Amino acid sequence: MATTISINPYSGKEIKSYNNHTKKEVEEIIDKADKRFYNWRETSFAQRKKLMLAAAFELKENKEEYAETMTLEMGKPISQALAEVEKCAWVCEYYAENAEEQLQNKIIKTDAHKSYVSYEPLGVVLAVMPWNYPFWQVFRFAAPALMAGNIGVLKHASNVFGSALNIEKVFKRAGFPEHCFTTLLVGSDAVAEIIENEKVKAVTLTGSGPAGSSVASIAGKNIKKTVLELGGNNALVVLRDCDMEKTIATCVQARFQNTGQSCIAGKRLIIDASISEEFVEKLVHKVRELKSGNPMSEETFVGTLAREDLAKDLEKQVNDSVEAGAKVVIGGNRLEAYFDPTVLTHVTEKMPAFKQETFGPVLSVTTFKNVNEAIALSNNSKFGLGVSIFTKDIEEAQKMAFQFDEGAVFINELVKSDPRLPFGGVKESGYGRELSINGIHEFVNKKTVYINK
Ligand code: NAP
């Protein structure tokens, strides 16, 4: 029987070994999930709302338990893990309160006596999820999917199986009927067969480009709907007239929270050359103050990366960029899974630190001479998840927003997800949207009903 071992990236010690589900067990779980669908879809919005609010309550009630597992499994600082659990409660509450209205029949006037669109669940939806926000990524899928009457089956990243089981536990403790939400303990090699299972109706994946491409092509072959939330290489575009102190604080947060392991992190600082020297000097001062250490300590802001191999990949991107002419102003060193908060200047478009997604605490700095150049630099990316613009000229920034190839433009704010707003990308950042009314509309059959007397 295959097993998956979970390692604490801070201590390097084994946390637990999990027996993977066998093919037969996976099939049985999907069969049970499919059976559950036919009565879950008959439940009223009021019943689902009660259960989803109970899930929110459970998250808040036992947040320490859930946060601790995340921190032990992937090195996220505990204060950020606690905040993540609370945010999951928020998305549960948001959909508990809004799903009914978002999915009510939409009357459309035609030649018919009456015609409308109804929004009906699809059935079992497979969620393939990453380790970086082990709870949030899953809940932002699960809350709308379950409220719409779908069933969730989770294949979580192999280093966070404890969190995956905890998520199943949240729904169980909240009182959801069995098999409304189940975790499969399997590796990525089992995913193709799960997608091909005729009882699985759709797939959502949050993760890397190669994983997204593989999942989408198998789903495509089987004519199944997909939503893909992939990588990002967001720019922080800093104009000359920005509020420097506030902008620096926001940029540090945007790049270094979650130890830089976020798809929407601001990875490329693109700054007006006339203010770059003063800005970078002050920014480096703030970076120096960031507290690194044991992620279980409340004080820690920067933890270890989730796995040592990820820290080694990051080290190579930094070293290759330095070899190509980038300068390390602070950081640049790795110790096992830990990577120093790092700022690189003199970064050009050809360097890995600009072209590739750096999934860790490394900020690259590139300067521009005029706004058109800034927009071109920001758009020079295969990704299109989001961008932040910092300026006091809000009107001008709003005009600029149109020119960015991104799923989101945030002015004087870091790019962040909010249950009330759609979230997702363009280009190689994926397609489809999560959160808001757009998210709940992804996994429903938009059924046309036409009635003549
Ligand atoms: P990853 O390697 O793609 O893993 C994500 C999930 O996909 C895991 O459950 C993984 O399982 C599975 N997987 C990997 N290869 C697969 C394949 N060929 N077929 C089917 N499933 C496969 O990504 P990661 O390293 O965990 O996460 C980092 C990436 O995710 C970054 O690029 C980041 O930007 C992106 N991300 C995007 C968003 C967003 O909302 N746009 C949010 C967070 C992260 P195993 O663990 O078993 O391999």
Image (cartoon, rainbow, N blue to C red):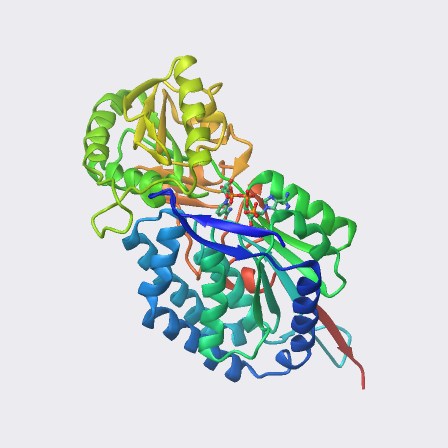
On screen, 149 above or below 341?
A: below
Residue 251 in the image: state x and y as whole percent.
30, 38
The quarter of the picture showing ligand 1: top right
Quadrant including the N terminus: bottom right
Residue 102 in the image: state x and y as whole percent.
54, 71
242 vs 389, left or right, is left
Examine the rendering and report whether any part of residue 393 can be seen. Answer: no
* Residue at image coords 65%, 77%: 36
Examine the rendering and report whether any part of residue 167 can be seen. Answer: yes
Given residues 418 and 344, the one toward you in this image is 344
Q: Quadrant of residue 26?
A: bottom right
Given residues 396 and 121, the one toward you in this image is 121
Residue 32 in the image: state x and y as whole percent.
67, 73
On screen, 23 above or below 375?
A: below
Q: Residue furthest right?
A: 453
Q: Residue furthest bottom?
A: 453
Given residues 311 and 266, the one toward you in this image is 311
